[in-house]
């Protein structure tokens, strides 16, 4: 019996690699796994790490490259990159999935609060959600929140005793990328998810000071939370080389956290994962060397 083919677009990014890891560990025999990447170099890297998969070169900005990638594809996990034109790329991928005629389910990677379209990141991903919903394709949205794996971006400050994170006294529940990958793999390898939007957060609501305390405890050094104003945060991100659109988007997201509009621990993640979600403390302990 021929196995169904699963295409992952964005397979070389953090979420894609985490999903490939979970799929190849837990569901290798369930699918022919096809990893969509932008370059031969990325394809070779993935094949070295996951030798049982297929790879295909595609470019979401060039729709003609998508046709061969979708040949005989049964399921799609669509992970858009950190690019400003997410809307156009979502449209191209979904159009290609419809044109293929074989796709029976699309798992769409999205973000917490996308349905409100109140900030840039939400509007970008909600466009893709709505476009997918309007297609003929069965869909599932996977809405995730800020990653624990983003914390190395603030490691220099933590090493100096200050966690510079402009969220005031707001709280949110940072999430493990490894957990996202395993959740995605579980959704893709089971039934009954069509037409659902899952919200996946981390297991604990944490303030900036709570996060600082975790790193202080793990590193054995004093760490205090410092909440810069928006202008200072934006200048810092731009100075670190962030594109302006993305830097402004992060400042908007921090505003959501500061207003406690993301102060939610969703039950979806643990239910879909089948085990407790990874805590920030576990992440910090496993990656202590990056913060000392």
Image (cartoon, rainbow, N blue to C red):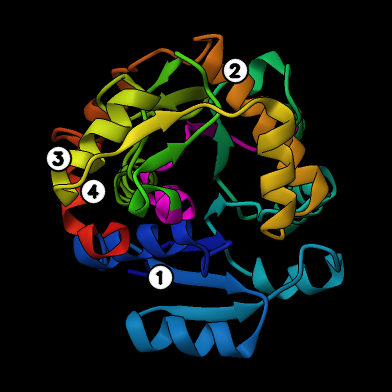
Q: Residues within 10 Å of mark 2 (few under 14, many from 20)?
A: many
The reply to whether the magenta stretch includes residue 205 is: no
Q: Is residue 107 above or below residue 145?
A: below
| Quarter occupied by the N terminus | bottom left
Q: Residues within 10 Å of mark 1 (few under 14, many from 20)?
A: some
User: Given this view, does label 4 or label 1 mark the residue nearer the observer?
Assistant: 4
Q: CA distance from mark 3 to mark 2?
A: 27 Å
Q: Is residue 67 above or below residue 291?
A: below
Relative depth, front residue between 72 and 119: 119
Q: Residues within 10 Å of mark 3 (few under 14, many from 20)?
A: some
Counting residues from the N terminus, which is met first, the one under dot 3 or under dot 1? 1
Residue at the disc numbered 4: 283
User: Given this view, does label 3 or label 1 mark the residue nearer the observer?
Assistant: 3
User: Magenta segment, which residues?
Assistant: 134-156
Q: CA distance from mark 3 to mark 4?
A: 13 Å
Residue at the disc numbered 2: 256
Q: Kindly indicate the quadrant of the structure image that contains residue 113.
A: top right
Q: Are marks 3 and 2 in contact (CB under 8 Å)?
A: no
Counting residues from the N terminus, which is met first, the one under dot 4 or under dot 1? 1
Asked which secondary structure carries label 1, the reply is strand
Residue at image location 67% in from the left, 53% down from the top: 82
Q: Position of residue 269 (x, y in %)?
A: 30, 29
Q: Position of residue 254 (x, y in %)?
A: 59, 26
Residue 279 appears anywhere in the view? no
Asked which secondary structure carries label 3, the reply is helix
Asked which secondary structure carries label 4, the reply is helix
Residue at the disc numbered 1: 32
Residue at the disc numbered 3: 217
């Amino acid at each position: 019996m021929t196995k169904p083919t699963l295409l992952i677009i964005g397979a070389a990014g953090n979420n894609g690699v985490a999903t490939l890891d979970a799929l190849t560990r837990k569901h290798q025999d369930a699918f022919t796994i096809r990893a969509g990447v932008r370059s031969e170099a990325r394809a070779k890297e993935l094949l070295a790490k996951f030798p049982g998969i297929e790879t295909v070169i595609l470019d979401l900005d060039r729709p003609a490259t998508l046709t061969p990638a979708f040949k005989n594809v049964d399921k799609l996990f669509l992970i858009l990159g950190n690019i400003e034109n997410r809307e156009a790329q979502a449209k191209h991928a979904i159009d290609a999935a419809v044109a293929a005629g074989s796709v029976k389910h699309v798992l769409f990677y999205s973000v917490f609060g996308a349905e409100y379209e109140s900030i840039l990141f939400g509007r970008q991903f909600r466009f893709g959600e709505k476009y997918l919903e309007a297609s003929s394709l069965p869909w599932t949205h996977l809405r995730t929140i800020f990653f624990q794996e983003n914390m190395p971006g603030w490691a220099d400050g933590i090493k100096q005793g200050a966690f510079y994170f402009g969220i005031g006294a707001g709280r949110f529940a940072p999430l493990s990328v490894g957990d996202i990958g395993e959740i995605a793999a579980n959704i893709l390898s089971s039934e009954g998810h069509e037409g659902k939007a899952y919200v996946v957060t981390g297991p604990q609501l944490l303030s900036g000071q709570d996060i600082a305390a975790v790193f202080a405890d793990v590193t054995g050094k004093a760490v205090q939370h410092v909440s810069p104003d928006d202008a200072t945060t934006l200048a810092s991100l731009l100075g670190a080389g962030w594109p302006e659109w993305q830097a402004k988007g992060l400042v908007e997201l921090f505003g959501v956290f500061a207003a406690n509009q993301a102060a939610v621990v969703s039950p979806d993640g643990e239910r879909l994962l089948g085990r407790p979600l990874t805590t920030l403390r576990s992440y910090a302990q496993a990656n202590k060397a990056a913060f000392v």
